[in-house]
Each structure stands twice: as structure tokens, then as C-alpha cells.
Amino acid sequence: MLTLTKKFTSAFSVSGMEKPLAEIIKNELAPVADAIETDPMGNLLVLKKGKDSSRKVMIAAHMDEIGFVVTSIDGDGYIHVSNIGGIHAVASSYQKVKFANGVTGVIVLENGTKAADISVKKMVIDIGAKDKKAAEKRVKIGDVCAVVPMLQKLGGSRYAAKAFDDRIGCVVAAYAALHCDTPAYDTWFVFTVQEEVGCRGSRPAAFRIMPDYGIALDVTSAGECGGSAVTKLGEGAAIKIKDSSVLCSPMIIDRLTELAKEGDIPYQYEVLTAGGTDTSSMQMVGAGCAAGCISIPTRYIHSPVETIDMKDLDACAKLLTAFIEKGV
Amino acid sequence: MDRIYDLAKTLISLPGVSGDEDRALPDLEKLFGHYFDETGITPVASFYGIRKSKKEGAKTVLLDAHLDTIGFIVTQICEGGFLKVAGIGRTSEKNLSASEVWIYGKKIIPGVFASKPPHLQEPGESEKKMELSSFSIDTGLSKEALEEIVRVGTYVGFKSETERLNEHVAVSPSFDDRICAAAHLRVLELLGDEDLGINIAVQFSAREEQGYKGAMTTAYRLNPDLAIVMDVGHAYVPGAPEKRKCVQMGKGCILSYAPQTTRRFTALAERLAEEKDIPIQLLAEPGRTGTNSNAVQTVRGGVPVCLISVPLKNMHTANEIVDLRDVMAASRLVEALLRKIGEQEGI
Amino acid sequence: MEFFERLKEYCDILGPSGMEDLVRERIIEDIKDSGAEYEVDAVGNLVVFKKGRQRRDKKLLVAAHMDEVGFMVTYVGEDGYLWFDTVGGIDRRVVSGRRLKFCKNGIIGVVASKSIHIQKPSEFGICEPVSEMNIDIGCYDRESACKLAKVGDCATFCPNYEDFGDGLIKSKALDDRFGCALMVDMINSDLEYDTYFAFNTCEEIGCDGASEVCYRIRPDIAVILESTTAGDVCGAPEGRRACEVRKGAVISHMDGGTIYDKELVALALEVGKEQDIPCQLKNIVAGGNEASAFQKGAMGARVLAISAPTRYIHSACSVAAKEDLISVGKLARAIIERKI
């Protein structure tokens, strides 16, 4: 699992530019797939056939991460940006950033920005260009970049990195795909695009599949200092009850709970008053599907130092595998 | 009027906070299954029933009302048997102190929103802003006993009676939108066995308060040719902006002109109302209607939608108030529309 | 009649200060065969004298109040809404959005509140003062509203007595119908000593009834049976809870209106200990009750207050533990059975 985590977190995959990560995942899963498709938006759909092909399960994890898009370059060569997804402006300030083409820069705040006024509008990127002309040679309007920090081991089984949201969801899905026995039903592992800008990828993917059951894998806020999150880091797979986009189907919540109990898998519940996930797209597709989500407890979401506990990852993978193998 | 009130009272006695509608489904089937030729429930916890016409190639008209109600969800079980909750749909926090709730755990148990005793209040605290997160629900049980019944994610709804203030005005939680479900059922009762030459599909859709998911998925399954969506709308109350006076209690049902409804369908309803002397109040909603209308309108290749609403006061509280005469007007208008659509095979 | 059945019936009666008639009539009905003498004074207080097996040198009086907090119509608006004020002290936040029942004709009204959708963001979560609230009785003009309610009409929270949680009860008006119900049970039993019982009016607006009774009866000792605020709510600091539900009868040593008689307080604690009745001392100095009126009324009396710890007092849903109510009853009984 750690190997997959390293591999997946190393890729550049800002919303709209998920192809590099899709390639990595595709290569990883090719040996076990019964079919692999890429749809027009760039979603990667990997099928593992099940014992019962009359029903379909969709597993969704999003490949994209938040980032910045260049909106203008000023005379002094500073690059002004807009956000892609929900940027945590305080946490992203004074970080190294990297563009898709490899150009590296630092993202800083305009001089004199007061703490209370920190926002993406006040952020500029310095790529070391002496003026506009020099900058334009390396970066142009519409180019996309993200902060750099890669996987860093903290104490015990805990790690920090940018974009664990939702690479670790991809890791859990991929890990389950690689290691599960024959699924109960035809199971589509879908690695979705553009979740961070409003769950855009998962909609057409869900429509294509028209699943009977849907399970999303995403991160959820967990036990930060001074926070009020329901979910705690290191206390197991979080079975989602709600976030602001969805109220999960009780049937899925109950089944996941049952499977966790049976398999002695540590679990907890998640009630998130903010944030949206691909779960919602699945629930509302076509005539609707019973949808739920296994969430991975994560601290400091959308910061360059998102922090997870590998033990939770392990629990999530076990729970997902159990669902895939045993069905409803 | 009494019949609609009784229907509403029965419907309101069924639970169904958004996300927890499954609890209401078996009873809906039991109570109202016989109104239809075919009934079903969907993966997104909605109930539907279809009355089929004998006519070949009959069009299907969908009547929608949402099943879910607003409420709360447990986020924490605290020492002393208190619960912390988050909102499902937004209610008015100022009404919560010392109000009653049902807690829909393994068992359904009562609870009371705790109010802070005066000696624990800071001076002037009663004037300050209250946040839902600072409230807790008293269950009168020990934490251990409570944990047997309730978990993080247990749903909580208002506990209050359905009562009449006077002959034609009634108060209850969940008139949003059970009163409209009652109005639809009343239409079916009035039609009796009559075949209008159209299939009438009724859906009580889930998750309206959380993104209209039940309506869009159920309508997808039912694949109607036309749809009448019913919901509640704000009636003018003192203190509201002047322009809200366009909708007042007791002056008839609301007919909405909106991009999210279909203009010629609405116009037909307006004409019919005039013909049949049914009181209506026109409402312009140039943006979103905040109802299922858009969800149903955009299903599959698109469905013409007419939105009819019942004026209501105190929306999203335990004391939603409707005038039963307005509800009757809505029922009559729906009935008239169905007849007309049957006669002219469309709008 | 079983105590909690009686309590339910008492709590469900509508009786705001100044309109205690229904409560009093019911109490008289319940004690008229007890052999006790009773009298209703000119302002509505009910005083009962029950002979015991022995005379007592000192006059001992047990008191509870019949009235509850409520609401009074002050103006009928042109648009059919009723303007009102509270009768007794009620936190505006437990008034907002409640249903009320009118004493005169039993109609229901709703304390009107602007729904969340039409509040300005600056109004979210903020409760307007009672003077800006009004009652909706489903009328759209003054004329029709006046047929149902007029200036001076009174209402209370809606009756809602119910068992609650594990051995608790929940109701409006536990303060102080509970004391009334206890006294009725005592009057209907055989007593060792002669004892006076006072069912007072208008406690909630300043203990008026108690002052009048004190003047007429001139007790040497007054024992007040009351409900008192329990602060054991979620997150309340331990030392600031005043008292807690399920921890027994509350004995006051001092509150906002009274420094209680030291010997009587000691006696109560001693009796509690002797008879194994759970008791607690109030751990803050706040609130007040009729003890102050008896202590300083007429020639003065020695006073003791025994209270039931009650959460959310003066709201539509006060919550108390059955076991505490029983403890208060036992303790009060044990004390009046003493010679003192």
C-alpha cells in the first residue's frame, strides 16, 4: 500500500490535467482488469467482472488535486493566479510550486497583506523571471501548477503530503482491485476527474455505468487541534453518513457497518457539515442508486501537509474489499 | 377541508428526515398503496404509485411532492446523556431552546433541546446570536444507555402535534411538504375510479432538502410526459419585505412563473383557475424556485413542469402554518389540470 | 390516586399568575374529603388546616404556589396578530417559536417568528425581545382575531406532561404543581401534628400570595416546597450547576432572597441522613422563592425550602427526576412529623 501511495502521490494531477496519474493507475491495474476504458472527460474506468453480472457496483475515487491557474503575468514577471478548487490560502502561501511543464516557482503573498486579508487574490508566483518577457518564455496564461511537498513520514504509521486528497482514495481503490477475490457483482473501479471543481467527472462516469450500488472513497476531516470533526485520525475507516452534498443511503451505511463488525475492521462514522464528494453523483444518476462512501480520516485537508495514518488506509482497503467480495 | 387535514395529519405522523426516509416507506405503501395500480420504492428512498389509463398510448402526468422533512443529525454523544447535532436543512436556531424532538435511533425516543439556566448565562446573553453547535439535546438517559440506541449519524426530527388554530388554519411540523402529498392524494380520492385518459403517476420524493435527488431519480424512472410539482411557499409575515405581499395566507394557492417551470403549462393553469374560479396568487421566480421543479424539468430529455405551491408561514420550524382553503385550491387546480390534459391530450 | 398521575393532571391545568382558579378548584376537589378545614381568601390563596394527632406549640405551615409562568395579550394588531408580554420571568429564547394555549377557550397560538429563509443573515440565530414577538392565531384581521382573543387574555405553554428518558418526567409547570401535588397527598394522610398548608397565588410575579398568607396565618415556621433550576446541562462547569437532577432533594442555605434558618437547614440534612433520603445543597447563591415573603412578612417566620432539581424551569419543557420528587416528598413529610 505504501508503494502505491508513493507512486500515486508523486504524479502531477491538478483538475483537468489528470492524465499522468491516470496512466500510472492504468498500468498498475492492467494485469487484473477485465476491461479498461477512458471516457471523453478523462475518467478511467476499470472493470472486474463478478460472480453475478446482473448487478453493477461503482467504486469512485478522484484523481485530481487542487491547484492554481495562471491568469496574468505582470511587468515585473510576477505571475497572478486563480484557484482551481478550494485553496487554503493561508496554508498554501510561501510554498514551492511546480507547473505541469516542470517550471518551479514560489508562491507568495503581496507585500503588506494582512493576515485577515489572505486570499488567492493576494497570491503571486515568482519563478525567478526578471520581467514579463522572461516569464512568458516559461509560463503562459492558462498554465496550471500545484504546491510541491511530497510524501513525508511522520511518527509511527503517519504520513504527510500534499494531495492525499484523493490519491489515497485511489490507492485504496487500486489496492482493493489488485487484491480482492472475484467480486460479488460486476465492479467498476472508476478514477474520476475534476472532483475538486464540483464533482464534474463522476457524473458522466456514473451515467455510463448506471450502477446499482456506489461507493466513493475520499478523505474526511479528522481530529485536528481545536477542530470539531466527528471523525478521528487512526480510529479506522470512516463510514460516511453525510456531507454537504449527500445523505448516504442507509442500506449502504448499515451494510458497511455489518461488514466492518464481521471482519473486525476498525470503523467510525463520519458526519461532515461541509464538503462534497462523488457519492452524490452516483446517488442521483438515472433512476438513482444506493450510494455510500468510505472516508479516509485526514488532517489539514487542502493544505500542503495533509496528514494520514496508514492504519486507517488499511482498514478502508479491507472494508472496501469486503464489500466488493460479499456484496449487499 | 377536514379530509385534507386528516390526510396531512396521517402523513405527518410518519417520520422521514432527509436521509432517513426509508422509515416512512413501508407505512406509505400500507396506507396508500391501494390508491394505485402499481407502486414502488426507489434506491433513493422515494415512494411512487401509478394509476394507469385504459387508453392506448396514454400520456403520463407526474405529480410530485417531496417526502423528506428537515431535521438534525447526531454528531456526538456526550456525558450525561446529551447529544450534539448538526442541521439537515436549516432551521431557525432562535426557536430551539426548550423545544421537543424525536430521536430516530434503534428505538424512537423523545428529547428536549436544553436551554441554558439563567445563572450560567453571561449578562445580555439572551440577545446574542445562537449557533446550532452550542445547543445540546437532553435525552434523560445515561450516556451508556443512550449509546445502545443512538449513534453518530442518527437522525432527529421535530416533535410536535398537528393541530388546528381555527377552522381553516392548521399548524404542524413538516407541512413542508406533507401537506402537498396530502393534496395529491386528495386529488386521487376526488377522481375516484374515473379514467381521464392519462396515466397518473405520483411520487413522494426523498432528499429534496438536500439537492432534489429523490425527485430527479424517481422522475427518471417514471419517465413522465408532463409533471406538476407541488411544494410550499413563503406567505407574507409582518417584518418581511413589502414585495413578499404577493403571497398571502388564505388567498389561494401559488402559481409560479419561472425559468425552472414551463410557461405554457403555467399559463394553462392560470386560465383554468380563472375559468373554475379557483383562487390563485401569482409568484415570479426568475432564479431558482428552490423546489423539485428544476430537477423534474431536466430529467432525461426534459419534462414540462407546472409548479403549484401552498402558502406557508414559519417554514422549517415545528410550527409551520397553512390555510386549508389554500390547500384545497391547490388540489382543485391539480384536478382541473389533469382533466384538461386528458381532454386535449397535452397542454 | 397515584402521585405521578395526580402530578400529570395538575401540570396539564392552565394557571398563569392571577388565573389560578382552575388549579385551586381541582385541589379543593381533591382535599374536600380529607377532613381538613380549608379557606379561600379574598385574593384566591387556599389555606388548609389539617389536625394532627397532637397539637404543635408553634404554627408550622407548608407552602407551594399554584401559579405558573404564562403570557398575556396586550394588543390585537390590525393584521390579526396578538402582541403580548410574559407573566413571570421567561427567557425570550424559550418563548420564540413555542405553541401557547389560551386559558379562556383553549385555542392554540404560535409565537410568530420570521422563518430562516426570510431572515437577514444578521438576524440568524438572534432572538428578538418578547416585546417584538407576536402570537399567530390563524387570523388575518383584527375583527376575526378579537372573536378569539382580547386584551388581557392569558395563555400558557401547551400541556405536554410525559415520562422522559430514564425515570424522568417532562412538562410545563412542574414549577410548582409538583409542590401542590405533594401537599395534597400530605393533607389526605394522617398527620402527627397540626399543620397548615398554603396553596399560594402569584408567586411568579413576586410572591404576592405568600405575603398575604403570611400576614393572615402568622406561621412560626414555613416550609416551602418548590422547583429549582438544575444546571447540570451539557458542558456546564461542575461548581456552577446549582444542583443536579437525580442527586436528591435540594436544601437551600441561601439564595437571592433569603438566608435560611440555620437550625432548620441542619435539621433537614440530619433527617435526610437518618432516613437515608438523598439530599443536596444548592452550590450557588441565586434565584429565590416564597421563603423570602414568609421570612420577612408580618412578624416573620423561620423558613426552610426543599426543592426538586428541575432543568429548563420556566420553559415549555421542564425536566425533573421522579426519584428526586419522591425524595422531596419524603423529606418534607419527615420534617413535619417532627415536633420542632
Image (spheres, coloured by chain):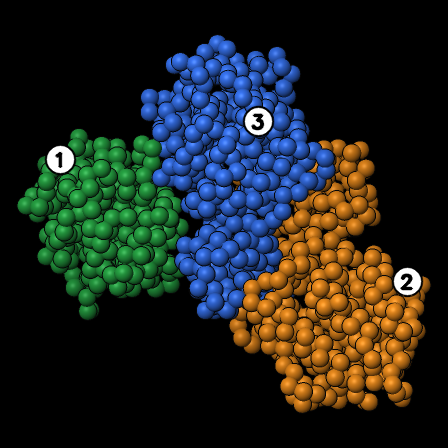
SS at circle 3:
helix
Disc 1 chain ID = A
The three-letter amino acid code for the residue at tag 2 is: Val
Chain seen in orange: C
Q: Which label sits in the foreground, 1 or 3? A: 3
At x 64% / y 32%, what residue is drawn?
B3
SS at circle 2:
loop
Quadrant containing the N terminus of chain B is top right
Q: Which residue is mark 2?
A: C43
Chain seen in blue: B
Q: Residue B225 placed where, x, y %? A: 40, 19
Disc 2 chain ID = C
Question: Which image quadrant for residue C293?
Answer: bottom right
The three-letter amino acid code for the residue at tag 1 is: Glu
Disc 3 chain ID = B
Q: Say whether residue B257 is left or right of residue C262.
A: left
At x 7% / y 43%, what residue is drawn?
A30
Q: Are marks 1 and 3 on the same chain?
A: no
State the separation of the CA atoms marked 1 and 3: 51 Å
Q: Which residue is mark 1?
A: A37
Q: Which residue is mark 3?
A: B189
Chain seen in green: A
State the separation of the CA atoms marked 1 and 2: 88 Å
The three-letter amino acid code for the residue at tag 3 is: Glu
Q: Residue B212 placed where, x, y %? A: 41, 35
